[in-house]
Amino acid sequence: MTLRVLGVDPGLTRCGIGVVDIERNRRATMVAVGVVGTSADQTLDKRLLVIAEAIDEWLDRHEPDVVAVERVFSQLNVSTVMGVAQASGVVIAAAARRGIPVALHTPSEVKAAVTGSGTANKDAVTKLVTKILRLDAPPKPADAADALALALTHAWRAGNGMGASGGSSGAGSLTPAQKAWADAEAKARRAR
Amino acid sequence: MTLRVLGVDPGLTRCGIGVVDIERNRRATMVAVGVVGTSADQTLDKRLLVIAEAIDEWLDRHEPDVVAVERVFSQLNVSTVMGVAQASGVVIAAAARRGIPVALHTPSEVKAAVTGSGTANKDAVTKLVTKILRLDAPPKPADAADALALALTHAWRAGNGMGASGGSSGAGSLTPAQKAWADAEAKARRAR
């Protein structure tokens, strides 16, 4: 059984999108990766429309089992955080419209899952993503690598994604540790 | 000629929506008002879906000429600002999908337009909105009154909305002061 996760690193200027297939033995294969970019010269409505249309296209084309989105915090750079949050809202609603479960992961969760350290830098994340997915070259820009890292994080943290969506289906196949992760994650998702 | 403006005071817990028709002589009539509410017990994706479906329904039913949304600032209460921004992103993208122009107005612009003072309190805004729209009772909750106030603000600031969408059509019918407002507004809309 393969779990297909679409990861999104939201943003107005660069929105990274990556699709990964993860097998039950944790082996991961990249399906697609890309970055949707919009210019600050465009109005906000046009920028959000570009992102909305892109995410719709990716969801339709790749039909992921779950969408993993970076959790946005207000402590980020204040000049860009509003746009990041607005873009993430559009992405989350697009998945919800299709009935696709959405999971949110913090940057430190992603770093920890991929590199083993919650304080790793972007280069380390990109390097490990490249290695894990057996890519010939590092995904660029960093937003693309981050989107793939989010997808990997989601599948691994939730015990290969079985029961990851907060429901109880499949949870019986998890180890106690995986079950604890899945429960903690479901709890985090319920919090605003 | 009548301009129909749909105003939105975005939020996850309460999202105010109000529709107003404004005649060229600035006389305004309420078409509809409501509040879409979601519970913090729901997951973020479900909450954004409820808002997305509601705004779609309102846009389809009322076919506004323009959508006016409160501009979100990161200085707001950090525990709720991310949800407000995500909801606003969903609303703005929904309008953009339909090709409906979107305008953003700050809370102080709204207060100034409706009450004459940029520092007026919520009660004053509600009171004036009730009077301006000749309503029998004040719209409740405050989010509903705010949505109507946003719609009024947009129409009035842009010189009854002619040429309000950043285009030049109809701008010739504006007084120099109205033209200046419309230009400033178009400029503000281009900024992130």
Image (cartoon, coloured by chain):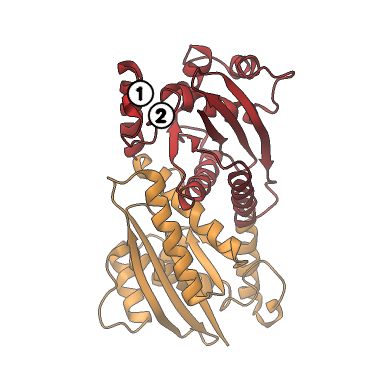
Chain colours: A red, B orange
Q: Nearer the viewer, residue B129 or B184?
A: B129
The chain holding disc 2 is A
Chain on which label 1 sits: A
- Same chain assignment for discs 2 and 1: yes
Tell me the residue at 33%/33% (across/down): A186
Helix, strand or loop at disc 1? Answer: helix
Is A56 on the left-hand or right-hand side of A174? right
Q: What amino acid is labelled 2 in the image?
A: Met
Q: Quadrant of the C terminus of chain A?
A: top left
Pointer 2 residue? A162
Residue B148 figure quarter = bottom left
In the rendered structure, which amino acid carries the disc numbered 1?
Ser
Give percent across and percent down for residue A99: 45, 48
Q: Residue under circle 1? A: A173
Side (left or right) of B133 relative to B63: left
**Residue A172 picture location, percent across and down:** 31, 26
Residue toward you, A80 or A32: A32
In this view, the residue in front, B1 or B119, is B1
**C-beta proximity under 8 Å, tags 2 and 1:** yes
Identify the residue shown where x is 60% and y is 48%: A60
Which structural element holds mark 2?
Answer: loop
Q: Is residue B116 visible?
A: no
Which residue occupies the foreground of this view, B149 or B14?
B14
The residue at the far left in this view is B137
For marks 2 and 1, give the one nearer the viewer: 1
How many marks on residues?
2
Picture layout, residue A120 above or below residue B20: above
Furthest toward the right, the residue is A136
Q: What residue is shown at x 69% (from left), y 79% (from top)?
A: B170
Q: Residue at x 35, y 75 (%)?
A: B129
Image coordinates for residue A185, horizontal then vertical, percent: 36, 29
Residue A30: which numbered mark, if any? none
